Image (cartoon, rainbow, N blue to C red):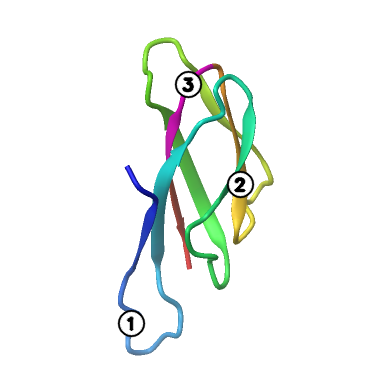
Amino acid sequence: GSPGYYKFPAPSNSTFQLIEEWGTANPNGGSVTVSFPLTFPHACFSVQAISIAGGSVATWLTGPTPPSTSSFQLSNSGGSSYWFAVGY
């Protein structure tokens, strides 16, 4: 599917908004830099990824740790991967 994001409403006593972002990437057995659809204003504190192909295809994040506010590195052993990130 298409990449996207959702900004949760900020609590009335806070300026921070929780943001979820998602998308797909195609390392196809290599490594790619994935840019977030929206740069996190403060930090990205979690990125998860899983292979679309399933089976024995491995998917892993290759850095940086923690992810930057604008991108992350994704690798896999073949095909495409779904990814999901959370930050604020």
In the picture of the structure, the residue carrying the numbered disc 2 is: 72
Distance (Cα) linking label 3 and label 1: 40 Å
Residue located at (60% from left, 61% from top)? 69
Mark positioned earlier in the residue sequence (2 or 1): 1
In the rendered structure, the answer to whether residue 30 lies left or right of residue 23 reads right
Question: Residue 18's image quarter?
Answer: bottom left
Distance (Cα) linking label 2 and label 1: 28 Å
Mark 3 Cα within 10 Å, few/some/many (few <14, many 20+)? some
Q: Which mark is residue 25?
A: none
* Amino acid at the residue labelled 3: Gly
Q: Which mark is residue 79?
A: 3
Q: What range of the chain is rendered magenta?
A: 78-83
In the rendered structure, the answer to whether residue 30 lies left or right of residue 25 reads right
Q: Quadrant of the N terminus?
A: top left
Coordinates of residue 9 in the picture (x, y in percent): 30, 77
In the picture of the structure, the residue carrying the numbered disc 1 is: 11
Coordinates of residue 65 in the picture (x, y in percent): 66, 47
Nearer to us: label 3 or label 2: 3
Q: Indicate whether residue 82 is drawn in magenta.
A: yes
Is label 3 in contact with label 1 (beta carbons under 8 Å)? Answer: no
